[in-house]
Image (cartoon, rainbow, N blue to C red):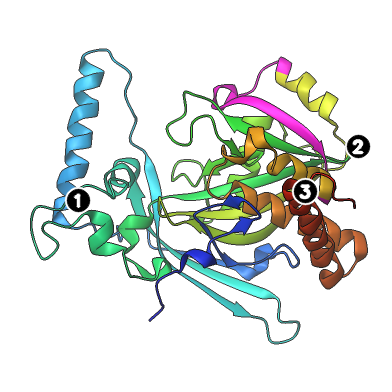
Amino acid sequence: MGAPLHDREHFRIGPLRTTCYVYEGDGTRPISERNLRVYYEAGDPVYVPEEVRRWRQEIEDEQRTRAVAGRDRRWNHPRFAVETVAVTRSDDREDPIVEIRFSPADYFTFLAAQQLNRPLEEGEGAGKTLREHYLDGQDPILVNGFLSASFGANVAVVTGRDHKMLFSRRSATVGGNAGNWNSSANEGLSGQHDLKDGVPDLFGAARRALREELAVHEGDRCELELLSFAMDTERHQWAAFFLAVLPDLSEEQLRDRWSRGIDDKWEHSEFRFVTAEPDDVLAFMLSPEVLSHWTACGPALFQHALVRLMTRHHDDAGKGRLAVEKAIDRTTAKLTDPRSQD
């Protein structure tokens, strides 16, 4: 059995504290598609405790009532629950191998299980909240799958023509993390859109995020790498971190495309392009206007993306990671003493 997390295991940079737990990867070694092994039993839905099933039914009834009244409603759709995640290494090069087992779930189950602070009324957990009964004191990686009915593909984008990293701010109309800075693009794994050969397709979800949110299309050159896996332990939501380098595109070209329309334009209220160098990116991430407006796992994604860029630049994992660590030291020193020099 695993052990519960200590606060110090959550991702942090200087004054920036998060509830993001990095489970696998640091940006130095991408996880290839062939080393991502996904398993899925379409006919074996995730187990959901009876009381949480009732909460789910409440949500379904409420949304049906809203629909009849002609009000905005949330649509149910198939999703995937994470049953297990395991990491091994290849025998020859010790490359990371990640195995994930999913079960069928749906959006209303996800919404019910997100009521983590709602008290349970029956059974051995009566009087405790869902979080207290199922999560507190437990290794979050090993808990019941119904709590993990969300898996996000989070992409950090770097333009190739002008070497800029893209940051996106979630709009006030999205369901969660409204107004916070986040990955360049992200999508939750969907049972409607992200099945390939009968199993959930993480790389496909990342490409869909690029297409629907940033108008980066299938014919565009895109160097897409899976860097790492993490979890927002406050919301108990899994995330896969991707880096997408777009060799033929620039900030100006992307903004021109957006002016002509994007499928999911409403999801973001603001975009920032920052020179894709460690000092510039970290200065933006830790700036006073941005520091307290991050999603849980956004900072970890961009730090891993920086490490990957520097690893490629130096052609050495150790030198790449060290280049980013030194930039972190310089940036945090400037925050405590603006007179600090490089």
Q: Which residue is mark 1?
A: 52
The label number, if any, that marks residue 337 in the structure image: 3
Q: Earlier in the sequence, mark 1 or mark 2?
A: 1
Label 2 to label 3: alpha-carbon separation: 35 Å
Label 1 to label 3: alpha-carbon separation: 51 Å
**Residues rendered magenta in the picture:** 259-278
The amino acid beneath tag 3 is: Asp
- Residue 225, given in percent of the width and then of the height, sits at 72, 56
Quick one: 310 or 195, which is closer to the camera? 310
Quick one: 296 or 268, which is closer to the camera? 296
Q: Is there CB contact under 8 Å for labels 2 and 3?
A: no
**Above-or-below relation of 317 to 268:** below
Q: Which SS class for mark 3?
A: loop
Quadrant location of residue 263? top right
Question: For the view shown, which residue lies furthest in the left direction?
Answer: 122
Q: Earlier in the sequence, mark 1 or mark 3?
A: 1
214 sits to left or right of 201 = right
> What residue is shown at x 25% (from left), y 19% (from top)?
67
Q: Is there CB contact under 8 Å for labels 1 and 2?
A: no
The amino acid beneath tag 2 is: Arg
- Residue 125, given in percent of the width and then of the height, sits at 14, 62
**Is 289 included in the stretch rendered in magenta?**
no
Crowding at mark 3 (Cα within 10 Å: few <14, some 14-19, many 20+): few
Label 1 to label 2: alpha-carbon separation: 50 Å
Q: Nearer the viewer, mark 1 or mark 3?
A: 3
| Residue 50 in sight from this viewpoint | yes
Image quadrant where one finds the N terminus? bottom left
Q: Earlier in the sequence, mark 2 or mark 3?
A: 2
Quadrant location of residue 102? bottom left
Crowding at mark 1 (Cα within 10 Å: few <14, some 14-19, many 20+): some
